Amino acid sequence: MDYSAIQKLENLLLVSVPRDLVDDDVIRMRRDILQAVRKYNSQIVLLDFSQVDICDSFFGRFIYSTAQMTKLMGAKIILSGLQDAVIETMVELGMALPDVDAVLDLDSALALSRAQAVQGSLVEGAASGPPEA
Amino acid sequence: MMTAGHDTLFFRIKDPMDVAKARREGMQMSMGLGFNQADATKIAVVISELGRNIVNYAGSGTITVIARSETNGKKYMRIIADDKGPGIPDVERVLAGGYTTSNGLGLGISGSKKLVDEFSIHSEVGKGTTVTAVKWLVK
Ligand SMILES: Nc1ncnc2c1ncn2[C@@H]1O[C@H](COP(=O)(O)OP(=O)(O)OP(=O)(O)O)[C@@H](O)[C@H]1O
Ligand SMILES: [Mg+2]
């Protein structure tokens, strides 16, 4: 199974989730994500779901647990590219994913992360500026 | 002219790989019968949840997926998950959802029920479990 598709893209960690994930792959992928977050000090992990057409409760738990784990490393999971059919099925199944944000596609994700980067540097700039009288 | 008939897929289920194969082929078969992407996805997820339960709670079992066309033109998919595992002591409770003995979400069965039109469980403690799900093709 080729899930080596974890790459750094600007200040995002981009994870291309493969179409058919078997349980062991899921666990391994989660470990790889955590390692990469540490290595690149990523703030945002983008899980690209555009190839995924079946999402069951195990997969849902994987998304949720990965979100919790990356949060403890100071990073945030964003889902992107969820197919309509997958969205409909997840919601009807009753799989709520609280605290997990989503964007429609990769472009929106990049825009969001660039906006956050700008905001971050503004905040940093303010903090390192001269103290107010 | 409508012709009646059916196609059957049969899977022995003992590990997650078998489940992945069954849901993938079940999804393809549903689309072949005329189901749209969303409904075929639902059928695949039901196969996945029932298959996963077989692996987790019974160790092994079978899944049969039937695509059927009736003479009146109506079509449906039927999924039968069968095992000789420990059985489910309180079926009503499992159907209600949120009940799990494995630190899951208790979503598999109650959620699957929402994705199909007909859903029934026949289970006897110590003998095994048979779950049947049917989804009709609506045009
Ligand atoms: N084939 C089976 N044989 C024996 N017990 C079963 C079987 N399928 C389900 N059960 C029992 O019913 C409970 C509920 O099943 P269900 O699939 O709804 O949730 P789960 O498997 O616990 O968690 P989830 O599916 O959300 O990961 C299980 O925890 C298990 O105790
Ligand atoms: Mg289950």
Image (tube, coloured by chain):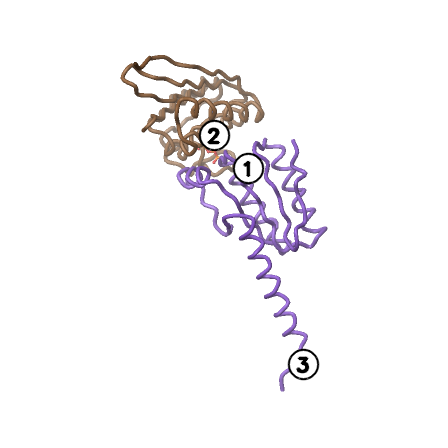
Q: Which chain is purple?
A: A
Instruction: Please tell me whether mark 2 sits on a helix, a strand or a loop.
Output: helix
The reply to whether label 2 and label 3 mark residues of one chain is no
Q: Which chain is brown?
A: B
Q: What is the C-alpha distance between the residues marked 2 and 3?
A: 59 Å
Position of residue A69 measured from the top left corner of the image (x, y, whole percent): 60, 49
Residue type, mark 1 in image: Gln
In the displayed structure, A25 sits above or below B70; it is below
Q: What is the C-alpha distance between the residues marked 1 and 3?
A: 49 Å
Q: Which residue is mark 2?
A: B49
Q: Which residue is mark 3?
A: A130
Position of residue A122 measured from the top left corner of the image (x, y, whole percent): 62, 70
Q: What is the C-alpha distance between the residues marked 1 and 2?
A: 20 Å
Please state, as top left, top right, bottom left or bottom right, where the N terminus of chain B lies in the image: top left
- Residue sitting at x 54%, y 26%: B20
Q: Which residue is mark 1?
A: A51
Residue at the right extreme? A39
Q: Earlier in the sequence, mark 1 or mark 3?
A: 1
Q: How many marks?
A: 3
Label 1 close to label 3 by CB (< 8 Å): no
Q: Residues within 10 Å of mark 1 (few under 14, many from 20)?
A: some
- Mark 2 belongs to chain: B
